Image: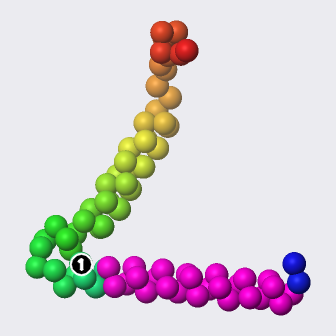
Amino acid sequence: MSHEDRMEFERLLMSERLATEMEMTKRWQADMASDSWLAKHTRPLIVLSLVVALFLFMTLDSLDIQFEVRDTWVS
């Protein structure tokens, strides 16, 4: 791949990334312009629930709980 081809690829990649970010911004603006509480808070609630789930799984993983997987579940 020549240097010019690489530069053209980088330009295309950057323009695609910019277009994606612009569409994301439009979605967020539409959410904020809505009168619905759920539309405004869906994305933050999803992020919050994922953070809570991650924290819960990290805590459970650190407790060193012994468990056994029965042979009937392994096939």
Residue under circle 1?
31
Q: Is residue 69 left or right of residue 27?
A: right
Magenta-colored segment: predominant secondary structure: helix
Which residue is at the far left? Answer: 35
Which image quarter holds the C terminus? top right
Give SS at disc 1: helix
Q: Is residue 40 above or below residue 23?
A: above
Q: Is residue 39 left or right of residue 46?
A: left
**Residue 61 position within the rendered picture, expressed as x and y whole percent measured from the top left:** 48, 36
Q: Is residue 37 visible in this depiction of the protein?
A: yes
Q: Is residue 10 above or below residue 72?
A: below
Residue drawn at (40%, 82%), measured in percent from left and top?
23
Residue drawn at (80%, 83%), measured in percent from left and top?
6
Q: Is residue 29 above or below residue 70?
A: below
Point out the stretch of residues depicted in magenta. Answer: 3-27
Name the image colouring: rainbow
**Residue 55 position within the rendered picture, expressed as x and y whole percent measured from the top left:** 41, 49
Residue drawn at (34%, 85%), measured in percent from left and top?
26
Task: Name which residue type carries label 1.
Answer: Asp
For label 1, count other residues whose C-alpha is less than 10 Å away and answer few (under 14), some (14-19) or many (20+): some
- Verify whether residue 16 appears in magenta: yes
Q: Is residue 68 visible in this depiction of the protein?
A: no
Which image quarter holds the N terminus? bottom right
